[in-house]
Image (cartoon, rainbow, N blue to C red):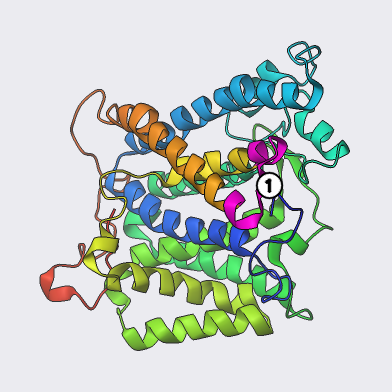
Amino acid sequence: MLGFGKTEFGHSFTQGQVDLGKWSVYGFFILSGILVTRSGVRLGLGRFLWHRALRLLPGLWVCLFLTAFAAAPVLYWKLHGTLDGFWGHGWGPVEYLRSNGAIQLNQNDVSNVMSDAMAKGVAHDRSIDGALWSLYYEVLCYGGVALLALTGVLARARRAVLLIAGLLGWLVIRQAVGDRFWAGSFDASYFHPVDLPVLGFTNPVLVIYLGFAFALGAVIELYRERIPVSDVLGFASLLVLVLSAHYGYLFAVGLPAFAYFLVWLAIRLPAPFRRVGARNDYSYGIYIYGFVVEQALVILGFARWGLLPYLALSLAVTVLLAMLSWHCVEKPAMRLKDLGGRRRGRGAGNAPASPAPAAAAGERDKVAVGS
């Protein structure tokens, strides 16, 4: 809990394996694996990359700008009573934009705002918007989909994706052997980031675990005509998820169960729930603004109101910013997705994603998650 320096919900129940925040990241990567793989098959390579860039970059750039040039100076003034030293700082707002504008989070703070807040005992995390770390690994997964589409694997050799998922799963199981409460990538302190050419600092364990979640989603998409939508399997997957969360081997056993449960839940939820985000998708805005809003409210003193008021205010401000981000930045940017022509290309293999198209009315027993 950013405002209180406590562990997040679920940390105790899972014996430290995961908490609500980290579990949300894995769920996001699973769903992203489904939808991005579908996009990789349906679109040509150039159009696919263009769509991904439009979906991520404009919203991110505006968020970085507002964080560096609106939130950070206000918080700096709140801490010091002056802006002296803020604008000319070596790790100031301009450097924050430059360092983080290409997706990878290379600078966590702006003019030492969060470091100073921690030194004063006000804040409990050194990053002003720490949630942005996972964007880099999401983009790595996009690159993997692009490569598989370019080589025709998605269209003509989907078993290769199943093999990749199996390999990543084997690596996860291998690391969990001997420690059933292994906390996944966040427990692998002996794996230090490596500085890769072009890519920069990359944590190989995060690539394995988040890549496994993404690959599970990709397999669900590519084999959707073979995956039954069963209420028995849905409740069984939930049971496996809960048991593995509490008794161990969450990532080896619970993560695949979680993947099936998410898809089953998305299909079985009542129609009003399935329409959430169909026209206005605020999820990305909530993701990029939630952390910085919580940090700002902590420094401004709102954590003194207590946990529930603090969380309620954080949620309200975050949703408001997410709505503004969608309607003023993200949605207008997405209108450019067909720039240069409205023809829809298929993947490099010029073939459908799988032998069967999306589930029709008579195929409701198979997986088909909306784009």
Q: Residue at x 43, y 54 (%)?
A: 32
Q: Residue at x 25, y 45 (%)?
A: 279
Give, as a single range, the part of the protein colored magenta. Answer: 295-310
Instruction: Specify the quadrant that holds the N terminus.
Output: bottom right
Q: Is residue 29 above or below residue 111?
A: below
Residue denoted by label 1: 303
Tell me where residue 302 appears, x and y as whole percent: 66, 42
Residue 307 magenta: yes
Residue nearest the observer in this picture, 146 or 255: 255
Q: Is residue 40 above or below residue 261?
A: above
Q: Secondary structure at mark 1?
A: helix
Residue nearest the observer in this picture, 321 or 285: 321
- For residue 221, which quarter of the picture? bottom left
Residue sitting at the far left: 362
Mark yes or no: residue 139 visible.
no
Residue nearest the observer in this picture, 347 or 269: 269
Residue nearest the observer in this picture, 295 or 302: 302
Residue sitting at the far front: 305
Q: In the picture provided, is 253 more to the left or to the right than 173?
A: left
